[in-house]
Each structure stands twice: as structure tokens, then as C-alpha cells.
Image (cartoon, grey):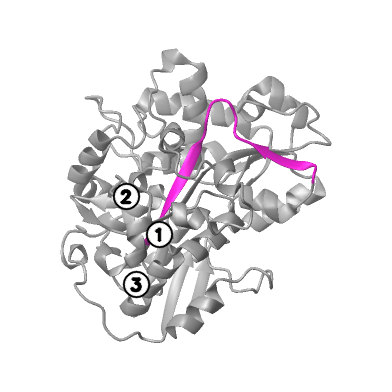
Amino acid sequence: MRRNSRTAGALVSMLALTVLAGCGGDGDGDSESAQALTELGEKEGQVSILAWPGYVEDGTNDPEVDWVTPFEEQTGCQVTSKTYGTSDEALNLAKSGDYDVVAASGDLSLRLVASGEAAAVNTDLVPNYAGVFDFLKDTEWNTVDGVNYGIPHGYGANLLQYNADVVTEPPTSWGAVFEESELAKYKGKVTAYDSPIYIADAALYLMKHDPDSGITNPYALDQKQLDAAVALLKTQREYVGEYWSDYLKLISASETGDTVVGTTWQVIVNAIGKDNIRAVLPEEGSTAWNDTWMLSSQAENVNCAYAWMDYIVSPKANAQATEYFGEAPNSEAACAETTDPKHCETFHAGDEEFSQSLWYWRTPIKKCLDGRDVECTDYSQWTAAWTEIKG
């Protein structure tokens, strides 16, 4: 079953506001937050943003990387921002009410809706939304019951990073971090992403290499399938030197040689900027993200929040942000603005078939996302399993 089928979308639409509440929500998500703004007012002069690292760059990290300042100059909205390392961390921060806008991956977006932390978004008030690739719109991770809860940003795959000075034979499979014969070569120098959603990476590997597991969707695992993924990750645990959620720690560990192989993002490889630190998309495919800019239901600066959502998906700003991060932009117009003329080709921007080959982060729920008439494990069970894996 392809990860963005409309069948799955309809299923989640019906269930998100009830079942997902058990995954961290504390509200029904269908009251005032489902009523989108009908018109904009005067800008408040400020906006607070919660996002992944590399999404809200103002020149602080690199004077040459700044798309925040032009926004502030154009709108009069001064930006404050905070980065997070995992979607679980972002959920807790979002509940504080300190942020007007949240950049959310698919393992967070529906939890924000279910908990009442996300407000519906009127896409008519976001002019640049019209240019976004159609296959990124109205997906099961940004739309519930036909109501839009955000604006699609960029998308990309989780990659396999390796140090070519140590891993001399370029890996082509996730077996480099899941097969014990491979792991033994790099004991203590293997890394993995520190989040329960990483269980899906193990499930994807089993789906490709163990047909008897019956896995057809890495986010739809019954108890037996979850147990199999956990067993694989427990084996991997013996060889992991350090799990990462703070991308700066992975950069440092990669530069010192403390990490030589493991999961990464393209932005991390770009930031390291060394020829020996490389990343590949393995032959099994990968889990991935398609992030959504979401409006907090507690937003105090709604007009500036809308201004930001429109600006960050505008061609130039979206090109800057997605090229810097290392992901596909969300529109053809953005592709025309990238500094690397081959950027969109490299990241398969606009290639719907390629996009459907990736498994975008989703929130596991008890109603199996693959359509089976059995009970699947939900995110709370994945969280407990992840604690058990790490010991």
C-alpha cells in the first residue's frame, strides 16, 4: 500500500480526532481550532516559530544564509524561533503556547490536530499555496475531514551516512546498520536517530528482507511485527555508540570519527562539508518527511503567522530553505530559484512517483494504516518499546 493513498487519508480523517487523542492529545481537536480564519487583520509586529534546525535561518549560523531578515523587512514581523530535535520534543514545546507557527513532520502533525494544538488554516489567505505541488496538498498528515491544518513545506528522505575513510566499500543497503555481520565492523561507532519513530526504519528493512513478517506499511505494525522490529533494534543497540536527536552532536561525532555509519539528514552532511562524509539513499528506499507549517491554536500573532506561512512557501524563500536543508522544494517555481541548477533533479522535486516510493513519517494508531482488520500498535506502545530498546 503506497504511503499517501487517498484510502489511508480517508481512514485517518475519520479516526484522527478520536484515536489519536490517546497518542498524546488532551483535547478533541474539533472545536474552535477547526474553524479557519476568514480574513486577515493588521500584523502584530512579531511572530514566534518552532521548527526543525535549518528552517528559520537569520544569518546567525552563517552570514550568507538568511531568509528571515528579508521577511522581517517586508512584513514588519520580527521573528523569534526555537529549534527541536524530535517530534516528541516539539509536541511538548507546542503545548506551552509560546509559538505561533510550528513546522511539523507527519509523526507530529496529526497529534497537534488531535490535541487541539493546531488551528485550521485558510489556504485562500496564503496566496503562494496555489503553486505548491498538488500531490503535497490534502494529504493524510496535513488535512483532516477535508479541513487543511497547514501548508506543505519541503520533503526528503532519511539517509545512510558513512565515513569513506573507514567504511571503504560504499554501502548500498540499510543492512549496514541492521545486519550484525556489518555492525560488528564498526562497534561503538554506529549511530541512529533517537526517537520512537525510528522503529519504522527497522520495520521497513524487515518489510524488504523478511516477507514472512507480513509488513506492508512500516507504520502499521501489529504486536508480532512490532516485536520483530524491536528485536532487530535491540541487536543494533549493542553496536550503537550514541543515538542522536541534536544534529549538532552528530556533526561533532562525525567530524571526530566517533561515528562512522548511521542515519542522517542531508543538511548534516552539508554542514560537515567534508569529502569523506557521504550519504546515500539505500536500495530499500527510506522513511522520509514531508513537513507542514501549522498554525498554533494558541497563536497570539495570527496575522504575522499567516504572513510567515505565505513567505516561507514563496518561490525564493522556499528554494533557500529547502536547498540549505537538503530536501525537495514544494513547487516548480521554487526549483527555478535554487542556486544549484540540479538541486531539484537531485532531490526528485515534483516527481510524484518517486515521492510515493518513500514512507513519510506517520503517527501509528491502533486502526491499522494498511487497512488490515486487526489491531495495530499505537504511538504510545512504540514509545514504550523505544525505552525498552535503549535500556
Residue 250, percent from left and from top: 68, 51
The residue that mark 3 highlights is 306
Q: Amino acid type of disc 3?
A: Tyr
Gap between marks 3 and 2 measured at Cα: 17 Å
Rendered view: 269 above or below 72: above
Binning the other alpha carbons within 10 Å of mark 3 as few (below 14), some (14 to 19) or many (20 upward) gives: many
Query: Relative to residue 20, is residue 205 drawn left or right?
Result: right
Labels 3 & 2 near each other (Cβ < 8 A): no
- Position of residue 367 relative to residue 387, above or below, is above
Q: Which residue position holds label 1? A: 91
Residue 150 location, quadrant = bottom left
Of marks 2 and 1, the one in the foreground: 2
Q: Farthest residue toward the right?
A: 165
Assign a secondary structure to mark 3.
Answer: helix
> Bounds of the magenta span?
275-293
Residue shown at the point (60%, 34%) measured from the top left:
281
The image's mark for residue 366 is: none
Amino acid type, residue under disc 2 in the picture: Lys
Q: Which residue position is annotated with label 2?
A: 137
Element marked by disc 2: loop
Residue 199 place in picture, x, y as percent: 48, 36
Q: Residue 261, how many percent across, how many down?
A: 70, 37
Residue 304 visible in this rendered orientation of the protein: yes
Nearest the eye: 325 or 379: 325
The residue closer to the viewer here, 139 or 165, is: 139
The tally of labels here is: 3
Amino acid on which the number 1 mark rests in the picture: Leu
Q: Residues within 10 Å of mark 2 (few under 14, many from 20)?
A: some
